[in-house]
Image (cartoon, rainbow, N blue to C red):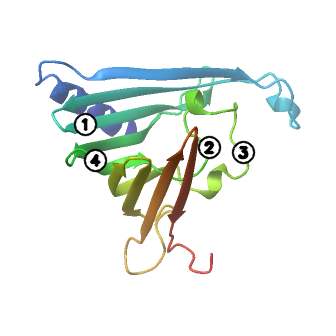
């Protein structure tokens, strides 16, 4: 089966399932269009590109399901298909905890993934040194000025070539709100290269 068919089918199932409840899912997203004015490669000068994202979210009681569909960066007029940025559920556990499972944005690094959340247009050189999305489960707790996330996921650097099967990443983040400032410390492991 083609990947685009599977992704389209997953989107249809989510939307159809949301209509079982009285209210349908909320739909949001953004589009991003830019032109490169100057580049070391003369062939890339004045090239116009576009990217977009459509997000679906449905909450029923203490459970929320979210699907973020990215329309890959492509030259205008070409087709590069779609990717799933997030496909997750979040279940509230009392007033100050939750459990998240599926594919979710990694709670690590300074730079955000989506264009509307960035402080600048493009990502810096450190962006790819940490994961953007993880496939796994995450427990979150918050109370007062402190919030903590702990998770286990597939190895964020990809499948290892070892014979033991899939490797896992363990990680977490502690965030403290001190007045107008937020201070966070995050850590993630990788079995992909034990020397790193």
**Cα distance in 3D space between marks 4 and 2:** 26 Å
**Residue pointed to by mark 4:** 96
Q: What residue appears at the point 18 percent right and 18 percent down from the top-left corner?
A: 23
Q: Residue 111 location in percent, x, y?
A: 62, 43
**Residue pointed to by mark 1:** 64
**Cα distance in 3D space between marks 3 and 4:** 34 Å
Front of the two marks 4 and 2: 4
**Cα distance in 3D space between marks 1 and 4:** 15 Å
Front position in the image: 136 or 166: 136
Q: Is residue 173 left or right of residue 128?
A: left
Q: Earlier in the sequence, mark 2 or mark 3?
A: 2
Q: Which type of secondary structure does the marked residue at label 4 adopt?
A: loop
- Residue 71 seen in this snapshot: yes
Q: Which type of secondary structure does the marked residue at label 1 adopt?
A: strand
Number of numbered labels in the structure image: 4
Q: Is disc 2 surrounded by few (<14), some (14 to 19) or many (20+) residues within 10 Å?
A: some
**Residue pointed to by mark 3:** 124
Q: Which type of secondary structure does the marked residue at label 3 adopt?
A: loop
Q: Residue 149 location in percent, x, y?
A: 40, 56
Q: Earlier in the sequence, mark 1 or mark 4?
A: 1
Q: Quadrant of the N terminus?
A: top left
Q: Is residue 59 left or right of residue 179?
A: left
């Amino acid at each position: 089966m083609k990947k685009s068919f599977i992704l389209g089918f997953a989107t249809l199932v989510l939307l159809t399932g949301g209509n079982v409840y009285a209210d349908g899912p909320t739909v949001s997203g953004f589009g991003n269009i830019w032109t490169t004015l100057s580049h070391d490669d003369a062939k890339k000068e004045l090239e116009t590109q576009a990217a977009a994202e459509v997000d679906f979210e449905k909450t029923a009681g203490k459970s929320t399901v979210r699907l973020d569909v990215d329309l890959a960066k492509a030259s205008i007029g070409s087709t590069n298909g779609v990717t799933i940025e997030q496909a997750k559920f979040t279940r509230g556990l009392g007033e100050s905890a939750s459990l998240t499972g599926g594919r979710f944005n990694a709670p690590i690094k300074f730079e955000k993934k989506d264009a509307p959340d960035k402080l600048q247009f493009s990502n810096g050189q450190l962006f790819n040194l940490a994961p953007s999305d993880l496939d796994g489960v995450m427990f979150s707790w918050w109370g007062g000025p402190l919030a903590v996330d702990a998770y286990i996921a597939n190895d964020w650097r990809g499948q290892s070539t070892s014979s033991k099967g899939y490797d896992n990443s363990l990680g977490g983040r502690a965030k403290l709100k001190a007045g107008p400032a937020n201070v966070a410390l995050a850590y993630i492991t990788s079995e992909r290269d034990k020397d790193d």
